[in-house]
Image (cartoon, grey):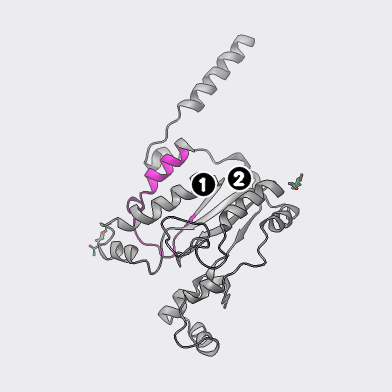
C-alpha cells in the first residue's frame, strides 16, 4: 500500500514537473483552469485611468475615441461646452491626480464583498499605463498625474489587506499608437508595435507584479494571434511563471 502510494506520488510529481507547454493552441489548451478561478464565482473589475477625469457617458474608457472620431456627438458637445478649444485628451492626464486613491481601503472593501479576485485596467486603449512602464515614455501614472505606481500599490494592498487574487487587465491595442497603426497598415505583416510595446509591457506586468489573472483585451478585433505573438507569450507564461 505504502509502496503504491509512493509510486503514484512519484508519477504525479514527474508529470507536474515535466509538463512543458509548446507555443501552439493544442498544447496551450491542455493547461487546466486553476481550481481557485473555477470556483471563484465573483470578481471585481475596475476601470481607472485618464478617462476617469471626464468620466463621461456610459463607456468612459472609450471617451477619447468617441470624441476624436466624432462617433458620439455627446462627447464632442461635452468638450465644446466645458473645455477650452485647444484642450487635448493628453491634458486630462495632469488632472488625473488620483488624490483619493487608497489601495488598502479598496482592498478592505473588496474583501468584505466576498469577491475572490479584482482586476484593474493597467492600460486601456488610450495607451496610458498605470505603472512606470519603460515602454510608455511620459505617458504613465508615474510621470504625469498621480506620480505613483498605481498597479504596484493595487497589487501590494490586495495581498496585504485581502484574500483576493490580483488581476491585471491589459489592452493589446492602442487606438492612436503610430507603431500600431503602421503595423495595421501593413496588414499585420510588420510587428514593430508588438516587439517594442506589447511584449515588453506584458513581461513587465508579469515579472514586476506577478498577477494571478492577466486579463487580455482588444479595442478592435483586428490582427491574428500570430501577430501578437500570443502563443509564444502564453507558453512562456505557463512554463516559467
Ligand atoms: C478577507 O476576508 C476573509 C473572509 O472572506 C477573511 O477570512 C480574511 O481574514 C480577510 N482577509 C484580510 C486580510 O482581512
Ligand atoms: C491580410 O492578411 C490576411 C491573412 O492574415 C489575408 O486573409 C488578407 O487577405 C490580407 N489582406 C490584404 C488586404 O492583404
Residue at mark 2: 37
Work out whether 153 lies above or below 13.
below
Work out whether 214 lies above or below 184.
above
Q: Considering the numbered disc 1 on the image, is that residue within a helix, a strand or a loop?
A: helix
Work out whether 54 lies above or below 194.
below
Residue 98 is situated, as x and y percent measured from the top left of the image, at 61, 67
Q: Nearer the viewer, residue 176 or 18?
A: 176
Q: Nearer the viewer, residue 193 or 238?
A: 193
Q: Considering the numbered disc 2 on the image, is that residue within a helix, a strand or a loop?
A: helix
Q: Nearer the viewer, mark 1 or mark 2?
A: 1
Q: Is residue 42 magenta?
A: no
Apparent side of residue 190 relative to residue 102 in the rendered image (left or right): left
Apparent side of residue 36 relative to residue 214 in the rendered image (left or right): right
Residue 208 badge = 1
- Residue 101 in which image quadrant: bottom right
Residue 113 badge = none
Q: Is mark 2 within 8 Å of ligand 1?
A: no
Q: Residue furthest bottom?
A: 81
| Residue at image location 51% in from the left, 71% down from the top | 93
Apparent side of residue 210 relative to residue 117 in the rendered image (left or right): left
Q: CA distance from mark 1 to mark 2?
A: 22 Å
Q: For the magenta stretch, what is the residue range?
A: 216-238
Residue 194 is situated, as x and y percent measured from the top left of the image, at 35, 55
Amino acid at each position: 500500500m505504502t509502496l503504491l502510494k509512493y509510486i503514484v506520488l512519484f508519477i504525479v510529481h514527474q508529470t507536474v514537473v515535466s509538463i512543458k507547454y509548446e507555443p501552439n493552441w493544442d498544447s496551450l489548451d491542455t493547461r487546466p483552469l486553476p481550481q481557485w478561478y473555477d470556483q471563484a464565482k465573483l470578481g471585481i473589475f475596475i476601470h481607472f485611468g485618464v478617462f476617469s477625469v471626464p468620466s463621461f457617458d456610459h463607456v468612459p474608457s472609450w471617451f477619447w475615441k468617441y470624441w476624436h472620431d466624432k462617433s458620439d456627438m455627446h462627447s464632442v458637445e461635452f468638450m465644446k461646452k466645458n473645455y477650452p478649444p485647444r484642450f487635448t485628451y493628453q491634458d486630462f492626464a495632469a488632472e488625473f491626480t488620483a488624490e483619493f486613491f487608497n489601495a488598502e481601503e479598496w482592498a478592505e472593501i473588496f474583501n468584505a464583498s466576498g469577491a475572490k479576485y479584482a482586476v484593474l485596467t493597467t492600460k486601456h486603449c488610450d495607451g496610458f499605463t498605470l505603472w512606470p512602464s519603460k515602454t510608455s515614455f511620459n505617458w504613465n501614472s508615474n510621470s504625469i498625474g498621480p506620480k505613483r505606481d498605481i498597479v504596484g500599490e493595487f497589487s501590494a494592498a490586495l495581498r496585504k489587506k485581502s484574500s483576493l487574487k490580483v488581476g491585471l487587465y491589459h489592452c493589446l491595442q492602442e487606438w492612436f499608437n503610430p507603431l500600431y497603426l503602421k503595423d495595421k497598415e501593413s496588414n499585420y505583416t510588420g510587428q514593430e508595435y508588438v516587439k517594442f510595446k506589447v511584449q515588453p509591457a506584458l513581461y513587465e506586468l508579469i515579472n514586476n507584479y506577478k498577477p494571478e489573472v492577466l486579463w487580455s483585451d482588444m479595442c478592435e478585433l483586428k490582427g491574428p494571434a500570430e501577430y501578437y505573438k500570443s502563443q509564444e507569450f502564453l507558453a512562456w507564461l505557463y512554463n516559467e511563471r
